[in-house]
Image (cartoon, helix red, strand yellow):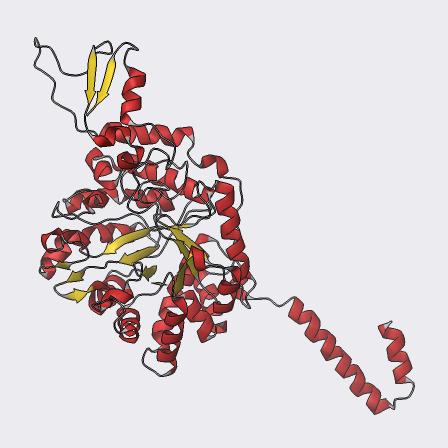
Amino acid sequence: MLVILMRLMMEGFGLRRRSAFYAFIFFCCWGVTSGAAEYVKYKDPKKPLNVRINDLLGRMTLAEKIGQMTQIERENATAQAINKYFIGSVLSGGGSVPSPQASAGTWVNMVNDMQKGAISTRLGIPIVYGIDAVHGHNNVYRATIFPHNIGLGATRDPALVKKIGAATALEVRATGIPYVFAPCVAVCRDPRWGRCYESFSEDPKIVQEMTEIISGLQGEIPANSRKGVPFVAGPNKVAACAKHYVGDGGTHNGINENNTIISQNGLLSIHMPPYYNAIIKGVSSVMVSYSSWNGIKMHANHYLVTDFLKNKLRFRGFVISDWQGIDKITSPPHANYSYSVQAGVHAGIDMVMVPHNFTEFIDDLTFQVKNGIIPMSRIDDAVRRILRVKFTLGLFEKPYADHSLADELGKKEHRELAREAVRKSLVLLKNGKPGNAPMLPLPKKAKKILVAGIHANNLGYQCGGWTIQWQGLSTNNLTTGTTILDAVKSTVDQKTESHIL
């Protein structure tokens, strides 16, 4: 048809006009074909990582860059919002689920629906979905719940903790999620701190040993890898996050989100060592603490975030804020939001967790960059780090999750691993001396057994915080499991009376 049309049109053309027309047709056809088959470096997995990052970064507008720095809550993350604002990351807050008792398939479908919004943007940069998985995949129904860090630290068994990390990674991937806000590597120095259970130990050396969980979550970093570069071994692993940087376990009087009053030498010798190990193991991200160090909010601490973590320790992953963390730079929170944005981003925070009112953050940061308050170099540093983790995760090659790992959620082998962790973390009464009647083990045919404590017959209390919801629940219906009382009853003789006090 095109040839016939050209012949008809050429019959009335002179030689000069005919030559110009042929040239026009050639360039039109070349433009169409070359556009369809355009070679883009950042989409080529064979290219070196930095080549891909630089190529993509050079193509991005300011709006696309700021979108990458923005992490929003699942309930606000429609495909349309992700597409419109070029959102770079989505999270589930504690208890934020697609539906009550959602299956692995429901989670996967939800994440993929969001991913469609990201992939349909001009550059097709995928989102990275993050979730708290601090003692197993704790937000998800039927997931394996492992002991909290305080229990795992009591095992003194880094190899066991690494296995738990690997099992958790599989269960998280089973729901289509590639990024976890774990582990917490706080060094709890005051038991009055209500989140002490999230700390492996008051001894920084033990916490350092337990960072082996990162190798379980992300995979074992190759021996020749550069220090500080993020590493994720493959599609069965997840990007990890060391938190909360730094000193959250040493606040005055154990008050949560309070002031850690300590010299620099004390901070570096007590609270910083776990981060050395995390960085050596290739941790992908570091989350900043709500707390302060000697009166300076960590979310606004340029020295510790940029000068020390990024420059001195050569951490090359991205730094993420805590939930509405930049709001809390001022007191009361959000009192001067423009200042909070400036202080937080200037300090070195790369991805900002703004779960709800994210358009305010985007508008404010855009204004500050356009008016020279925050330099473009700071924005480029943030986006470069985020893209590095996304490329490392393989999201550009495989942005969508599948259902192939669904059977990993709550599988028998993982529950057996959890039981092993419980056995190794238990504190038992000392047995009687030889010749005396020993206290343990209890006889199965005892007449009566008293099981003391309200936790003994409450699965929610037994699992603790960060189970389905971030503060936990008081119920036996929040997930599947066995209470201590039920376990005792199933073990002893049928005639033994089991009472709870």
Residue 112 location in percent, x, y?
Answer: 52, 52
Can residue 414 be seen in the rendering of this structure? yes
Screen quadrant of the N terminus: bottom right
The residue positioned 28% from the left and 66% from the top of the image is 326
Image position of 42 (left or right of 432)? right
- Residue plotted at (29% across, 16% down): 491
**Residue 137 spot, x, y in % from top left:** 37, 42
Residue 334 position (above or below residue 280) = below
Can you give x and y, in whole percent of width and height, for residue 251 in the image? 13, 55
- Residue 285 lies left or right of residue 235; in this view the side is left
For the residue pair 274 and 83, the one nearer the viewer reads as 83
At 32% from the left and 32% from the top, the residue drawn is 418
Place residue 460 in its image quadrant: top left
Q: Which of 421 and 6 is in front in this view?
A: 421
Horizontal side of 31 relative to 215 (left or right) equals: right
Report the front residue among 300 and 216.
300
The residue positioned 29% from the left and 58% from the top of the image is 322
Q: Is residue 390 visible?
A: no
